[in-house]
Image: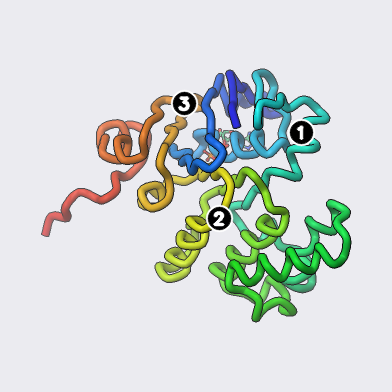
Amino acid sequence: AAVRDVVYVYPDGRKALDGVSFHVGEEERVALVGPNGAGKSTLLWVLSGLLPPTSGEVRWRGRTLDEAGRRSLRARVGLVFQDPDDQLFSPTVWEDVAFGPLQAGLPDAEVSRRVDAALVKVGMSHVRDRPPHHLSQGEKKRVAVATVLAMEPELWLLDEPTAGLDPRARRQLVALLRELHGAQVVATHDLRLVAELCSRAVVLDGGRVVAEGPARTLLRDAELLNRHGLEPWPPPEEVP
Ligand code: ADP
């Protein structure tokens, strides 16, 4: 995906994105890092086609996202919300994962195939008949990933995927994300996640791209990270 000079102004007049440009290769995992309020979530929504940019351009595989393009894009791009409770709303896990494929009008056999495969992939087949709101945070997160996986997206947009997870759930989720096919844009201020998952990073602050480069290089630039409210990873040696 390529984003060029994208500006997004919320209805109340707040400019959340102020001329953002960057690109994501077809199987690339790019981190979008920056402090709270930097515009990361807004940028994911614009990339997902759910928010039309106020100005500027979003392209995916060479196609500009005008009104029709955004509609077809929504089927090929999957957004994993920060809070899985915003993504899961059906009486059972199985129905939540089936929701997207059913909405897309896929035949029943294909819906079943995709839901079963997605639940196996995220290791959640055993909870298929349970209500999602009874699951732990880590389990909900994996089911949320399954809802997107069932759509077989080309581009994954993940908003703070590790937020609220305990160490084991976090490790399982990172391993899962590393196995997914397709491009990924990961918005986070978890620089450890960036180190574990992403080859490239884009630093966003105040709605602008303030730095961009190989993740390893940016992660070593403690001064840059501090200036934009981020904690270096690995952390500096602790003083006893
Ligand atoms: P981040 O994800 O990096 O924390 P956001 O994209 O959520 O940043 O927010 C960027 C800016 O847009 C912030 O100043 C935030 O207050 C503002 N903002 C976010 N959502 C809305 C909204 N629905 N209406 C008005 N302003 C918003």
Measured in 3D between alpha carbons, the distance from the residue under mark 3 to the one under mark 1, in whole angstroms, is 23 Å
What residue is pinned by disc 3? 209
Q: Residue at x 59, y 26 (%)?
A: 3
- Identity of the amino acid at label 2? Leu
What residue is pinned by disc 1? 70
- Identity of the amino acid at label 1? Arg
Which of pointers 1 and 2 lies earlier in the amino acid sequence?
A: 1
Residue 87 vs residue 30, the one in the foreground: 30
* SS class, disc 1: helix
Check contact, mark 3 vs mark 1: CB within 8 A.
no
| x then y, percent, for residue 139 | 58, 70
- Please indicate whether residue 198 sits to the left or right of residue 187 in the image: left
- Identity of the amino acid at label 3? Val
User: Where does the C terminus fall, quadrant-wise?
Assistant: bottom left
Q: Find residue 73 and report its image quarter.
A: top right
- Please indicate whether residue 197 sits to the left or right of residue 235 in the image: right
Single out the mark in the foreground, 1 or 2: 2
Q: Residue at x 75, y 71 (%)?
A: 94
Q: Residue at x 45, y 64 (%)?
A: 170
Which of pointers 2 and 3 lies earlier in the amino acid sequence?
A: 2
Check contact, mark 2 vs mark 3: CB within 8 A.
no
Work out whether 141 lies above or below 28: below
* SS class, disc 3: strand
Q: Residues within 10 Å of mark 1 (few under 14, many from 20)?
A: many
**Quadrant for ligand 1?**
top right
What residue is pinned by disc 2? 180
| x then y, percent, for residue 191 | 37, 47
Q: Residues within 10 Å of mark 2 (few under 14, many from 20)?
A: some
Single out the mark in the foreground, 2 or 3: 2
Check contact, mark 1 vs mark 2: CB within 8 A.
no
| x then y, percent, for residue 114 | 74, 63
